[in-house]
Image (cartoon, rainbow, N blue to C red):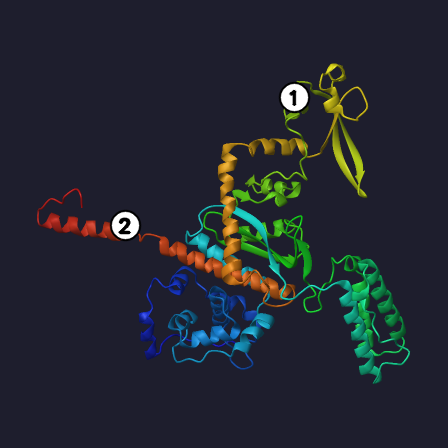
Amino acid sequence: MLREKEQQMSLYCMLYDKIPDSHLLKRIEKAVDFSFINELLADSYCKNNGRPAKEPEMMMKLLFLQHIYGLSDVKVIEEATYNLSYLWFLGMNPEDELPDPSLLCKFRKSRLREFSLDDILAEIVRQCVENGVIKSGSISIDTTHIEANTVKKVPERIMKHLAKKIFKALEQDLGEVPSEFDTNIPNYKKIADHKQAKQTMKDYLEGVMAKAAPLGKEETKTAIAEAKEILSDERFILQKGLRSFVDKDARVGRKSKTTNFFGYKDEYIMTTDERIITAVEVRSGEYVDGTEFDTLLERTKTAGIAPTEVYGDKAYFRKDILDTIKENQAEAYIPVSASSYKVNEEMYSYNKDSDEWFCFMGNHTVKKERKTTQKRGQTYELFSYTFDKNQCIDCPHRDKCMGSLKGKAKKLRVSVNAAEFYEINQFQKTAIFQEKYKKRAAHEWKNGEMKRFHGLARARGYGLKAVSTQAKLTAIAVNLKRIAAIIGGRKPDYSPIITCLRFLLRKFHFRQKLLLPSNI
């Protein structure tokens, strides 16, 4: 049951006067109205029955403090007990008792749902738009890596643990492991060939599962079902599936061509000018950047931001993303990706009006065909442009241009989007694009801030839900800090006071029949 929010009516509240107006928490409270949180989370509480609960606003503020200052559940309660600024921010009297640290964990798991955090983030951003903190529609999108809070294990070790789980389940169901089972699990570390070691462990585990299936009861069936589910994933043996029992959602992803990581990806949109995060989505490590672009953009628009410019790295140079940006009447500032656009512009140029390609010798295409090709088991569509054979035959650069290709005329094969991407690529060579794209650097600063000062480099908990909660609370924390910095950096608006004073002075001087100097 939710109780009415307690007011700071104690005599000891006079101590709060010692907190300066320039304090971070005072500036945050001045800029953001958190009263919406109680209403947002009211449905997760019983309105009429039960013991009075701690109000959601106060519990959320504890989580904000925790992520702003990098504290644990126990430490944030300990700090808030004697820190006047914390107590003032929480809306409590200095003599009030704080909740037990265990309630923070319970609040995160049972009361705070992922979509609630999205709503809280969106409402804070909406207030920023309404109050003039966010003024532009320039946004940037990027993905950062979060290391899992555990180590990844090879498939052989996972299968060893699965076999041990089945033996333990048999012992619980039958009282002992039947004698027909070979409990001496093969030592995969002594097998030099990694592929052979995996196959040996897989054969052993499947044999144990087959023998245990007709003997075991509930516990054994559960252990066998878990083993079957893991082995059925084709990516498991390839070391791209499950790698840890502690964190089953974490996956191996790529940082670059030569390095990888084990954990999660945090993709988010932020404003480039104010550097305020507008939407966050967390996925496992193998996530392909940009997959949730539409979702993140819609959340940004729901928060009241109409995008005018969208910045991203080469991973976001995809036709579907570019089309979405165009539909929203925004300008895309995303470098061309070589995987999407492969044309040697030193050799060929394109004229969009005539839909023709020109070679560096001045020859032009005279024929265009739409074709399909097979590559790595997938079908791709492309355009085949044929140049004028009369000029190709006598061209002095024929050998360089044609290479091993047969035929009288050069045939240039390009993707179906090559013509559109050519125009984009030409624009990206201009000084305007180069200057504008500098805004993209703001995302790198934000990545560093969240990882270095707020612990987002490594997950605090286990599983996708826990890591997603951590990432979204971190985003809210850095937003609150940034909002306070923007508010604190503003010069006070004295124009209404000056206008009022001028009026009073003019009135006074009129009565005294004196002239008011022009410089007042």
Say which of marks 2 and 1 sits in front: 1
How packed is label 1: few (under 14 Cα within 10 Å), some, or many (20 or more)?
few
SS assignment at label 1:
loop
Name the N-terminal-most of marks 2 and 1: 1
Kind of residue indicated by mark 2: Ser
Does residue 173 sit above or below 307 in this rendering?
below
Number of the label disc, if any, that sits on residue 495: 2
SS assignment at label 2:
helix
Task: Name the side, left or right, on which 507 lies relative to 10.
Answer: left
Does residue 58 sit above or below 281 in this rendering?
below
Residue 5 visible in the shown view? no
Q: Nearer the viewer, residue 295 or 346?
A: 346
- Residue sitting at 51 percent across and 46 percent down? 441
Q: Could you tell me how many numbered marks the image carries?
A: 2
Number of the label disc, if any, that sits on residue 360: 1
The spot of residue 26 in percent (x, y) is 38, 64
The spot of residue 352 in percent (x, y) is 63, 26
Task: Name the side, left or right, on which 248 lies relative to 23.
Answer: right
The spot of residue 397 in percent (x, y) is 71, 19
